[in-house]
Amino acid sequence: MRVRSLLLPALALFLLLFLLVSVMATTGQPQPVVINGTAVPPLPTLDASAVAAGERLYGQYCAACHGANLAGAADWKTQLADGSLPPPPHDSSGHTWHHADSLLLSITRDGGDVAANSRMPAFDGQLSDDEIWAILTFLKSRWGEEERKFQWWVTVTAGG
Ligand code: HEC
Protein backbone atom coordinates (compact mmCIF):
# COMPACT_ATOMS: atom_id res chain seq x y z
CA MET A 1 0.00 0.00 0.00
CA ARG A 2 2.72 2.45 1.00
CA VAL A 3 4.90 1.59 -2.01
CA ARG A 4 2.01 2.10 -4.36
CA SER A 5 1.20 5.54 -3.03
CA LEU A 6 4.79 6.60 -3.65
CA LEU A 7 4.86 5.31 -7.19
CA LEU A 8 2.91 8.15 -8.80
CA PRO A 9 4.85 11.03 -7.18
CA ALA A 10 8.12 9.25 -8.03
CA LEU A 11 7.07 8.88 -11.62
CA ALA A 12 6.02 12.53 -11.80
CA LEU A 13 9.36 13.62 -10.33
CA PHE A 14 11.26 11.49 -12.80
CA LEU A 15 9.32 12.97 -15.74
CA LEU A 16 9.89 16.49 -14.46
CA LEU A 17 13.65 15.93 -14.15
CA PHE A 18 13.77 14.35 -17.59
CA LEU A 19 11.99 17.36 -19.11
CA LEU A 20 14.25 19.79 -17.29
CA VAL A 21 17.43 18.08 -18.52
CA SER A 22 16.12 17.94 -22.11
CA VAL A 23 15.25 21.62 -22.07
CA MET A 24 18.66 22.51 -20.61
CA ALA A 25 20.42 20.45 -23.27
CA THR A 26 18.70 22.22 -26.16
CA THR A 27 18.34 25.80 -24.94
CA GLY A 28 20.87 26.01 -22.12
CA GLN A 29 24.48 27.13 -22.02
CA PRO A 30 26.69 26.50 -25.09
CA GLN A 31 28.20 23.03 -24.83
CA PRO A 32 31.95 22.26 -24.74
CA VAL A 33 33.35 20.74 -27.93
CA VAL A 34 34.49 17.16 -27.28
CA ILE A 35 36.58 15.31 -29.88
CA ASN A 36 38.60 12.15 -29.20
CA GLY A 37 37.65 12.43 -25.55
CA THR A 38 39.26 15.87 -25.17
CA ALA A 39 36.93 18.74 -24.26
CA VAL A 40 37.60 22.35 -25.22
CA PRO A 41 35.42 25.41 -24.42
CA PRO A 42 32.26 26.02 -26.48
CA LEU A 43 32.63 27.37 -30.02
CA PRO A 44 33.04 31.18 -29.86
CA THR A 45 30.67 33.31 -31.92
CA LEU A 46 32.26 35.14 -34.85
CA ASP A 47 32.54 38.91 -34.79
CA ALA A 48 30.16 40.17 -37.50
CA SER A 49 32.23 43.26 -38.35
CA ALA A 50 35.37 41.10 -38.77
CA VAL A 51 33.42 38.78 -41.08
CA ALA A 52 32.31 41.74 -43.21
CA ALA A 53 35.80 43.29 -43.34
CA GLY A 54 37.29 39.85 -44.09
CA GLU A 55 34.90 39.29 -46.96
CA ARG A 56 35.99 42.56 -48.61
CA LEU A 57 39.70 41.78 -48.11
CA TYR A 58 39.26 38.22 -49.36
CA GLY A 59 37.71 39.55 -52.59
CA GLN A 60 40.62 41.93 -53.01
CA TYR A 61 43.59 39.67 -52.11
CA CYS A 62 42.60 35.99 -52.23
CA ALA A 63 39.68 35.44 -54.61
CA ALA A 64 41.80 35.57 -57.79
CA CYS A 65 43.46 32.26 -56.82
CA HIS A 66 41.15 30.66 -54.24
CA GLY A 67 37.93 31.60 -56.07
CA ALA A 68 35.27 34.22 -55.40
CA ASN A 69 33.07 31.46 -53.95
CA LEU A 70 36.00 29.86 -52.02
CA ALA A 71 35.94 26.80 -54.29
CA GLY A 72 39.67 26.86 -55.19
CA ALA A 73 41.09 25.56 -58.48
CA ALA A 74 39.21 22.79 -60.28
CA ASP A 75 42.01 20.19 -60.00
CA TRP A 76 43.41 21.42 -56.71
CA LYS A 77 44.56 17.95 -55.62
CA THR A 78 46.68 17.35 -58.74
CA GLN A 79 50.33 18.44 -58.55
CA LEU A 80 51.59 20.78 -61.26
CA ALA A 81 54.75 20.08 -63.31
CA ASP A 82 56.90 22.08 -60.87
CA GLY A 83 55.72 19.98 -57.93
CA SER A 84 53.50 22.69 -56.47
CA LEU A 85 49.80 22.34 -55.77
CA PRO A 86 47.04 24.57 -57.23
CA PRO A 87 45.10 26.82 -54.81
CA PRO A 88 42.84 24.67 -52.60
CA PRO A 89 39.27 25.64 -51.67
CA HIS A 90 38.77 27.57 -48.44
CA ASP A 91 35.23 26.27 -47.92
CA SER A 92 34.25 23.05 -46.11
CA SER A 93 35.33 20.93 -49.10
CA GLY A 94 39.01 21.90 -48.67
CA HIS A 95 41.43 21.34 -45.80
CA THR A 96 41.93 24.87 -44.48
CA TRP A 97 39.72 23.90 -41.52
CA HIS A 98 42.15 21.08 -40.62
CA HIS A 99 44.69 23.68 -39.46
CA ALA A 100 45.04 25.69 -36.25
CA ASP A 101 44.63 29.49 -36.32
CA SER A 102 48.38 30.04 -35.74
CA LEU A 103 49.29 27.97 -38.83
CA LEU A 104 46.69 29.67 -41.08
CA LEU A 105 47.94 33.06 -39.92
CA SER A 106 51.59 32.18 -40.62
CA ILE A 107 50.87 30.61 -44.05
CA THR A 108 49.05 33.79 -45.08
CA ARG A 109 51.63 36.15 -43.60
CA ASP A 110 54.80 34.28 -44.62
CA GLY A 111 53.60 32.34 -47.69
CA GLY A 112 53.63 28.64 -48.51
CA ASP A 113 56.47 26.16 -48.23
CA VAL A 114 59.27 27.40 -50.49
CA ALA A 115 60.91 23.94 -50.48
CA ALA A 116 57.72 22.54 -52.08
CA ASN A 117 57.71 25.28 -54.74
CA SER A 118 54.54 26.66 -53.17
CA ARG A 119 52.78 29.35 -55.18
CA MET A 120 51.02 30.71 -52.14
CA PRO A 121 52.43 34.26 -51.82
CA ALA A 122 53.39 35.97 -48.54
CA PHE A 123 51.14 38.87 -47.55
CA ASP A 124 53.48 40.28 -44.93
CA GLY A 125 53.69 44.03 -45.54
CA GLN A 126 50.44 44.06 -47.56
CA LEU A 127 48.07 42.87 -44.86
CA SER A 128 48.29 43.46 -41.10
CA ASP A 129 47.77 40.54 -38.71
CA ASP A 130 44.36 42.06 -37.86
CA GLU A 131 43.39 42.06 -41.53
CA ILE A 132 44.55 38.44 -41.97
CA TRP A 133 42.59 37.57 -38.84
CA ALA A 134 39.47 39.19 -40.37
CA ILE A 135 39.91 37.13 -43.56
CA LEU A 136 40.21 33.94 -41.47
CA THR A 137 37.07 34.95 -39.55
CA PHE A 138 35.25 35.33 -42.88
CA LEU A 139 36.44 31.86 -43.99
CA LYS A 140 35.18 30.39 -40.70
CA SER A 141 31.78 31.98 -41.28
CA ARG A 142 31.48 29.89 -44.45
CA TRP A 143 32.31 26.51 -42.86
CA GLY A 144 29.73 24.04 -41.64
CA GLU A 145 29.18 23.53 -37.91
CA GLU A 146 31.29 20.34 -37.83
CA GLU A 147 34.24 21.92 -39.67
CA ARG A 148 34.14 24.95 -37.38
CA LYS A 149 34.06 22.79 -34.26
CA PHE A 150 36.95 20.66 -35.52
CA GLN A 151 39.11 23.68 -36.39
CA TRP A 152 38.33 25.28 -33.02
CA TRP A 153 39.30 22.06 -31.26
CA VAL A 154 42.55 21.82 -33.26
CA THR A 155 43.34 25.48 -32.44
CA VAL A 156 42.76 25.08 -28.70
CA THR A 157 44.59 21.74 -28.41
CA ALA A 158 47.50 23.10 -30.50
CA GLY A 159 47.77 26.02 -28.08
CA GLY A 160 46.53 28.77 -30.41
C1 HEC B 1 48.75 33.78 -56.52
C2 HEC B 1 47.73 32.87 -56.05
C3 HEC B 1 47.32 32.93 -54.60
C4 HEC B 1 46.79 34.02 -53.89
C5 HEC B 1 46.55 35.44 -54.40
C6 HEC B 1 46.46 33.51 -52.57
N1 HEC B 1 46.80 32.20 -52.45
FE1 HEC B 1 46.63 31.02 -50.81
N2 HEC B 1 47.40 29.46 -51.80
C7 HEC B 1 47.80 29.46 -53.13
C8 HEC B 1 48.28 28.16 -53.51
C9 HEC B 1 48.80 27.75 -54.87
C10 HEC B 1 48.16 27.36 -52.36
C11 HEC B 1 48.48 25.87 -52.26
C12 HEC B 1 49.92 25.63 -52.13
C13 HEC B 1 50.34 25.63 -50.72
O1 HEC B 1 49.58 25.17 -49.84
O2 HEC B 1 51.46 26.04 -50.46
C14 HEC B 1 47.62 28.21 -51.31
C15 HEC B 1 47.37 27.80 -50.01
C16 HEC B 1 46.85 28.58 -49.01
C17 HEC B 1 46.64 28.16 -47.64
C18 HEC B 1 46.89 26.77 -47.08
C19 HEC B 1 45.57 26.13 -47.36
C20 HEC B 1 45.21 24.87 -46.74
O3 HEC B 1 44.04 24.52 -46.97
O4 HEC B 1 46.00 24.22 -46.09
C21 HEC B 1 46.08 29.21 -46.98
C22 HEC B 1 45.63 29.27 -45.53
C23 HEC B 1 45.96 30.29 -47.93
N3 HEC B 1 46.44 29.88 -49.14
C24 HEC B 1 45.40 31.51 -47.62
C25 HEC B 1 45.32 32.56 -48.53
C26 HEC B 1 44.74 33.85 -48.19
C27 HEC B 1 44.10 34.19 -46.86
C28 HEC B 1 44.89 34.63 -49.29
C29 HEC B 1 44.51 36.08 -49.44
C30 HEC B 1 45.05 36.98 -48.44
C31 HEC B 1 45.54 33.82 -50.32
N4 HEC B 1 45.77 32.57 -49.81
C32 HEC B 1 45.88 34.28 -51.57
C33 HEC B 1 47.75 30.53 -53.98
C34 HEC B 1 47.32 31.80 -53.68
Image: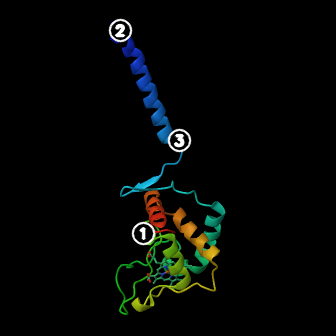
> Could you tell me the amino acid type at mark 1?
His
Q: CA distance from mark 1 to mark 2?
A: 60 Å
Relative to 54, say whether 61 is above or below. below
Q: CA distance from mark 2 to mark 3?
A: 38 Å
Return the mark for residue 133: none
Left or right placement of residue 79 versus residue 56 in this view: left
Q: Quadrant of the N terminus?
A: top left
Q: Residue at x 61, y 78 (%)?
A: 60
Instruction: For marks 2 and 3, give the one nearer the viewer.
Output: 2
Relative to 98, say whether 84 is above or below. below
Disc 2 to disc 3: CB gap under 8 Å: no
Q: Residue at x 46, y 68 (%)?
A: 91
Disc 1 to disc 3: CB gap under 8 Å: no
Q: Which residue corresponds to mark 3?
A: 28
Return the mark for residue 98: 1
Question: SS at mark 2?
Answer: helix
Q: Which residue corresponds to mark 2?
A: 2
Dot 2: within a 10 Å radius of its alpha carbon, few (fewer than 14), some, or many (20 or more) residues? few
Examine the rendering and report whether any part of residue 67 can be seen: no
